[in-house]
Image (cartoon, rainbow, N blue to C red):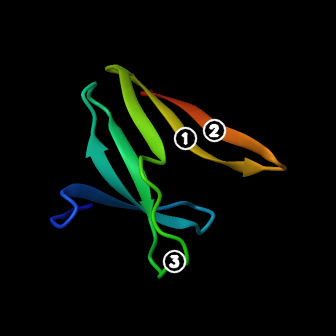
Amino acid sequence: MGYDERRQAWVRFGVISTGQYFAIRMTDTADNGWTWKYVSFFKTQNPETPGSDATFSKKSDSEYVVDGPSYEQNGTRVTEHHVCKKA
């Protein structure tokens, strides 16, 4: 994790056991959560879209909710929803 001075945001790097890797730029929200934007490691053809890709919200000391990202799947707009609970 590091801080991007130019964008005034935290950047977090992640790797999944399947070999996928990613970077996200995080911004604090008013409700003790974060929004994030996926960051490309490579030059892209399209400009970055405005807004966030997903929101991470604290519901309690032991539960968070992730809403997003959204994407097209078989012609339908789909938004992921996840609940994370502390064990």
Q: Amino acid at mark 1?
A: Gly
Please tell me how crowded label 2 is: few (under 14), some (14-19), or many (20+) other residues with Cα within 10 Å. some
| Quadrant of the image containing the C terminus | top left
Circle 2 residue:
79
Q: Is residue 87 above or below residue 44?
A: above
Circle 3 residue:
44
Q: Position of residue 17 (x, y in %)?
A: 58, 61
Q: Is residue 41 above or below residue 64?
A: below
- Mark nearest the camera among 3 and 1 is 3
Q: Is residue 51 above or below residue 81?
A: below
Sequence-first disc among 3 and 1: 3
Q: Position of residue 2 (x, y in %)?
A: 22, 63
- The answer to whether the residue labelled 2 contacts the one labelled 1, judged by CB atoms less than 8 Å apart, is yes
- The answer to whether the residue labelled 3 contacts the one labelled 1, judged by CB atoms less than 8 Å apart, is no
Under tag 1, what secondary structure? strand
Please tell me how crowded label 3 is: few (under 14), some (14-19), or many (20+) other residues with Cα within 10 Å. few
Numbered badge on residue 40: none
